Image (tube, helix red, strand yellow):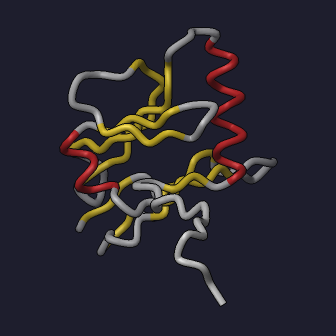
Amino acid sequence: MSNANDTKDASPPKLVLLTDSAKAEVRRLIEAEGKPGIGLRLGIKGGGCSGLSYALDFTERRDGDTVVDYGEFEVFLDKKSTIYLSGVTLDHQGGLSGRGFVFQNPHASNTCGCGESFSL
């Protein structure tokens, strides 16, 4: 029987999800940059074979950014990108045949073969 005063750590779902592999690689790359205050910026830009391309960079927070806190680092999205990237999972595939960072977008109606561009 549950008590109404019981509280569980029910964190709200993240706007964008990073797999454990992606989080480890982001931490490694941020440490390699050696600049305090930077985080991972995810975005979209026009172009690519399917119409929109993913953008990934390490920058400081900007006014108007949506911020997703991962504890050891933050993920920044501008307003336009937040609309397109809501629900996206970012993975990192390493190894000899790894592709690096890979976006898994449940809203994409079409993606190109390389996985770097999409359309809705």
Residue 105 vs 39, above or below: the answer is below
| Quadrant hosting residue 88 | bottom left
Q: How many labels does the image show?
A: 0
The spot of residue 56 in percent (x, y) is 44, 36
Q: Foreground: 23 or 69?
A: 69
Q: Give the residue at x 65% y 26%.
A: 29
Q: Give the residue at x 62% y 23%.
A: 30
Q: Foreground: 112 or 68?
A: 68
Q: Give the residue at x 37% y 46%.
A: 54
Residue 108 vs 31, above or below: the answer is below
Residue 46 vs 110, above or below: the answer is above
In the image, is 86 to the left or to the right of 11?
left
The spot of residue 63 in percent (x, y) is 23, 23
| Quadrant hosting residue 16 | bottom left
User: Which quadrant holds the N terminus?
Assistant: bottom right
Q: Give the residue at x 69% y 37%.
A: 25
In the image, is 19 to the left or to the right of 49?
right
The spot of residue 31 in percent (x, y) is 68, 19
In the image, is 116 to the left or to the right of 100?
left
Q: Foreground: 5 or 76?
A: 5
User: Which quadrant holds the C terminus?
Assistant: bottom left
The spot of residue 81 in percent (x, y) is 26, 46
In the image, is 1 to the left or to the right of 120?
right
| Quadrant hosting residue 61 | top left
Residue lying at the far top of the rendered structure: 35
Q: Foreground: 104 or 70?
A: 70
Residue lying at the far right of the rendered structure: 96
